[in-house]
Image (tube, coloured by chain):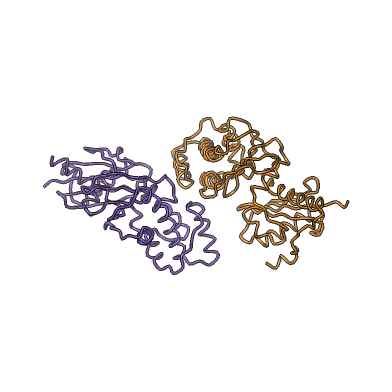
Amino acid sequence: MSYYIGVDIGSSFSKAVVLSGNELVSCHVIPSGGNYRLAADNVINEVLRKAELIPEDIACTVATGYGGSSVSHYDRLATDISCQGRGIFHLFPSARTVIDIGGQFSRVVKLDDKGRNVSFLMGEKCAGGSGRFLQVIAHVLGLDLEEIGPVSLKSKNKVSFNTGCAVFAETEAVSRIAEGAAVEDILAGVHDALAARIQTLVERLGMERDVALTGGGAKDIGLVRSIEQTLDTSTLVPEEPQIVAALGAALIAADISSN
Amino acid sequence: MKKQYFAGVDIGSRMTKVVIMDEAVLTSYVVSTGPEQRKLANKVMEEALAQAKLSFDDLAYVVATGYGRMNVPFADKQVTEITCHARGIGHLMPSVKTVIDIGGQDSKGIKLDSGRVVDFVMNDKCAAGTGRFLELMAEGLGVKLEDIGELSLTAKNKAVISSTCTVFAAQEAVTELSRGVPVEELLAGLHEAIAARIYGMVVRLKVEREIAVTGGGAKNIGLVRALEEKFGCPVLIPPEPLVTGAIGAALLGRDAVQKAADSGTPLVRSERRLEEASFF
């Protein structure tokens, strides 16, 4: 039996996946921190431990992501766009538009019917247009990031934000709380503000159904609903939206070995 | 003719400024803007009047400006801060053709001709390029806001800050600090980053000399030097850069009174008084 590793060192999180053939054996996600080499070593050790494997069992390793070149051993480096496309095509072959909401950037990728990247558009590195917005607001409201999605869905009276800047929105959220606005209404407003930024990106590239969501932002059900409403479409969301590029990297590793 | 007094009240996002003048500035008064702007406007006006040894009835006209200008119930007129800044600088520094105003939550570039606005650009959408950026950097690096300018000038090298976004730049600066980059080099890099951001906006105006810098940002010598480097020329700083807009507001009040007197038309004044207003 052959095993493959895909490892994705992102600006915020490092993810690794072990595959046996095309089957997922184990996956793991840790914060990247300030040392990518260390994060890569740790996430690979952990994903191997979960799979009950040793490094010698691995036939091929593909690294990707912002810090992909910091991985101490890999057989090939691949772009995160190609890995993400490969991963999404495996999970959702019908997806033609992929919206990736990461910790620093949002990105929209269009795929053809073979999962190949046709075109893409990257948002600027702006907290207001990325998952970082959610972190900033969760922090000021004293909530964990995992809590904000379900809380926001309870909103009956959305707060409309005057700004798309995370710094100004933080101040605005504080004044709205002081005025008596409910936490769920503020969160729903933040989700709408971020969805509006993502909509601008999607419209510039042109949306084609089906639409899939990936990245940490896709774990926030409040944001997912807000994006669906803004874009007027349903979306496909993987069970583990953060590991799609790592999964794609492992699939590419399997492709390399079988050729 | 009886001596006439005019007041300008500028309620900014972070600071509230009041100026009382006759021919020259008699009193200028600056306090932090709190959440209750209406009560605050009354209080600062009372204190400014006490300093000038005047009563509210001595004021011939009151003009309010700034982002909170609608929360000055005793003002006779509200005027945008762009117009007030232009009028203020036109009076203080007649040779100035371009004003760069760096406020707490916005920044603007104003082209002017004899104190009148010809064109302007403004950023209030993104914290990068505003005083808020500097505030957060000072906080993140553990340096007092009023010290960052001088401290940045002691840097031998400038750190390169790759992020424009305030949130990411702050994170980058703190990470670099923990890696041993001296704080003054980080501050020099951050001043350069904000200067580049402001330059990128203001340059759309076809900048002409002289250039003046106003607002809280003008009190930061590190930022002023970084702007001079970007624009390739020295810039002028008014003696009290925070109150330029308030001076302009007071002068626009004097203009209104003068115009009414010249044309013989009655002066339109607010009926509200300071005492009544304090019930808000």
**Drawn side of residue A188 relative to residue A168, left or right:** left
The residue nearer to you, when weighing A159 against A233, is A233
Confirm whether residue B183 shows in the render: no
Comparing B159 with A123, the one in front is A123
Left or right, B131 with respect to B17, comes to left
Q: Position of residue B135 (x, y in %)?
A: 56, 47
Q: Residue furthest right?
A: B1
Report which colour depicts chain B. Answer: orange
Q: Which x, y percent locates residue B263?
A: 80, 52
Judge by depth and name the residue closer to the eye, A185 or B188: A185
Quarter where residue B118 is shown: top right
Vertical side of A14 occupied by A179: above or below: below
Q: Which image quadrant is residue B120 in?
A: top right
Q: Position of residue B245 (x, y in %)?
A: 68, 47
Indicate the quadrant containing the C terminus of chain B: top left, top right, bottom left or bottom right: bottom right
Q: Is residue B266 left or right of residue B10?
A: right
Task: Please determine whether, in this image, residue B179 is positioned above or below residue A222.
Answer: above
> Residue drawn 79% across and 48% down?
B26
Q: Is residue A230 above or below residue B186?
A: below
Q: B273 or A177, which lies in front?
A: B273
Colour of chain A in the rendered structure image: purple
The answer to whether residue A207 is seen in the rendering is yes
User: Image point 16% across, 46% down: which residue?
Assistant: A3
Q: Is residue B50 above or below residue B202?
A: below
* Residue A129 percent across, percent down from the top left: 42, 50
